[in-house]
Image (spheres, rainbow, N blue to C red):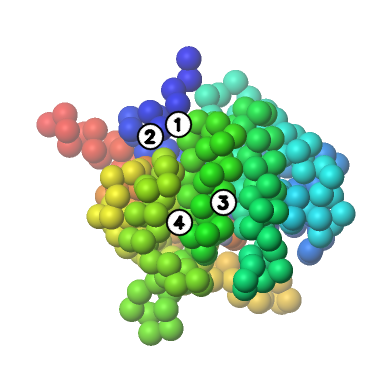
Amino acid sequence: MKKLLLDAIRERPRLADGAMGTQLMFAGLEQGGCGEAWNLTHPEHVLAIQKRYVEAGSDCLLTNTFGGSRIMLNRHGNAGKAAEINRAAVEIARAAFGGRDGYVIGDIGPFGGLMEPYGDFREADVAEAFAEQARALVQAGADAIIIETQTSLEELLLGIRAAKEAGAPCVIGSMAYDVTLDGSTFRTMMGVDPERAAEFMEEHGADIVALNCGTGMDMERARQAVKRYRRATSLPVMAQPNAGQPKLVNMKVVYDEGPEHMAAGVGPLLEAGAAIIGACCGSTPAHIQAFRAAMDLHRGAEVGASSL
Ligand SMILES: [Zn+2]
């Protein structure tokens, strides 16, 4: 029988996947289009992308449901299909593994607004949207749920509660940090630092503390965040940095960190104690393939050292 994700990462670090959004654009999704709806309308494209990540060596795939809450889907008139879209996403990711024992991580992204009193959204509506999404992901067989690209602890908490109430076997909370203007440290847009986030997640029953995306959070900053998490909590840590910074070249958005450049930061991330490593915006199957090689090399060196 397949091990639970939490047991699997105790055995050795695991590799997640790279970006979905930019890959969907390459496959023809229009800017501003509803990528999550493709789980129903173009499942073959989503499957092809995820298969490439599996071939590159991913042990874990995040479902194509970042904007899969009914509040986000409502912008495209797809709120009524929330459950169906999320279920389909789990099935596609599972199919992408073929016969392999991979881990399907149900992805819940931000609901895309501000809650009262700062914004127009009622907390109860956000909680219900996350609950519906989490239920669909867990019922379809997700091995874990990640609440990612979070900047506020209030919204993160709604996601963690939704995942736990849905019975998710593993709950991952992932914050998006921005490097401060003077470059001295990083915190989320809402002012949360890694120590506070880690303590908060542990207190509210998350199983893995993570970081993803953000601004200026390269592999070295991700390493620093992993170290700070490890000092603040005994929970396992996951990191998914972006492929550098987005730049406009010939009217196209490109990310400035290639596979080899990013992969050079994998060993240090592992040494800092990361249990799951993936990549966020701008990363590709080529990045994940380079990560795989770096992780295997690192493991080989460790195994070699311990058998001396
Ligand atoms: Zn990102």
Q: Which numbered marker is on residue 158?
A: 3
* Residue furthest top as drawn: 1
Q: Which numbered marker is on residue 5?
A: 1
Side of 171 relative to 51 (left or right)? left
In 3D space, how far apart are the residues under numbered discs 3 and 1 (Cα atoms)? 22 Å
In 3D space, how far apart are the residues under numbered discs 2 and 4 (Cα atoms)? 17 Å
Camera-side mark, 3 or 2: 3
First in sequence: mark 3 vs mark 1? 1
- Compare residues 52 and 198 and report the one nearer the observer: 198
Mark 4 belongs to which amino acid?
Leu
Which secondary structure lies at badge 2?
Answer: helix
Q: Residues within 10 Å of mark 4 (few under 14, many from 20)?
A: many
Mark 1 belongs to which amino acid?
Leu
> Mark 2 sits on what residue?
9
In 3D space, how far apart are the residues under numbered discs 4 and 1 (Cα atoms)? 18 Å
- Residue drawn 41% across and 50% down? 201
